[in-house]
Image: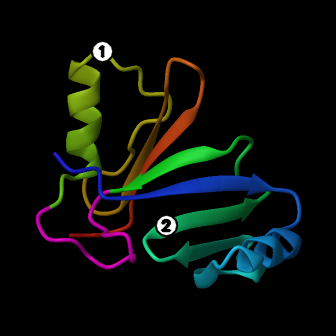
Amino acid sequence: MHVGAFSISLAVKDLATSRDFYEKLGFSVFAGEMEHKFLMLNNGEHVIGLFQDMFELNTLTFNPGWDQTGQNAEGFTDVRQWQAHLQQQGVTIDQEVTSESGAGFFLVHDPDGNPILFDQHRAD
């Protein structure tokens, strides 16, 4: 089972200030919109999401179905399969996938309380 693309989703106070900072570290915006209060930045295969007023905590994010460039990946494990697998392993799902197919997400927390988001954007 492959978790897909990995990024850190940062809960930021000021999106423009954070964008400027990460651009100084060599990151470039490749997705998102200031008006929607989120931006996705990359530097090579490293991806950072900046989210203003969306998350309370910084969150580890996996995107089943995507590669590190945000392109569709071949043969991926659907978020509903991931959720079922983790439930079988005894992992508590804090926010479950609500859709029966297509795009969807669920949230778990690791033993130290760090949020981990499985966020699938693909509809196939």
Q: Quadrant of residue 72?
A: bottom left
Quarter of the picture containing the N terminus is: top left
Q: Residue 56: image x %, image y %?
A: 74, 42
Q: Is residue 10 left or right of residue 77?
A: right
Q: Is residue 10 above or below residue 21?
A: above
Q: Quadrant of residue 71?
A: bottom left
Residue located beneath label 1 in the image: 90
Count the marks: 2
Quarter of the picture containing the C terminus is: bottom left
Identify the residue at horizontal 23%, vertical 32% (top origin).
84
* Kind of residue at disc 1: Gly
Foreground of the two, 100 or 118: 118
Q: Find the residue positioned furthest to the front.
A: 25
In this rendering, the label closer to the viewer, 2 or 1:
2
Q: Is residue 116 left or right of residue 17?
A: left
Q: Residue 20: image x %, image y %?
A: 82, 78
Q: What distance separates the C-alpha of mark 2 from that of mark 1?
A: 31 Å
Q: Is residue 14 left or right of residue 92?
A: right
Foreground of the two, 34 or 99: 34
Label 1 element class = loop
Label 1 Cα crowd, 10 Å radius (few <14 / some 14-19 / many 20+)? few
Task: Name the chief secondary structure element in magenta.
Answer: loop
Identify the residue at horizontal 81%, vertical 68% (top origin).
18
The magenta span reads: 64-75
Q: Is residue 34 above or below residue 14?
A: below
User: Which of disc 1 and disc 2 is earlier in sequence?
Assistant: 2
Residue located beneath label 2 in the image: 46
Q: Residue 83: image x %, image y %?
A: 29, 36
Identify the residue at horizontal 82%, vertical 70% (top origin).
15
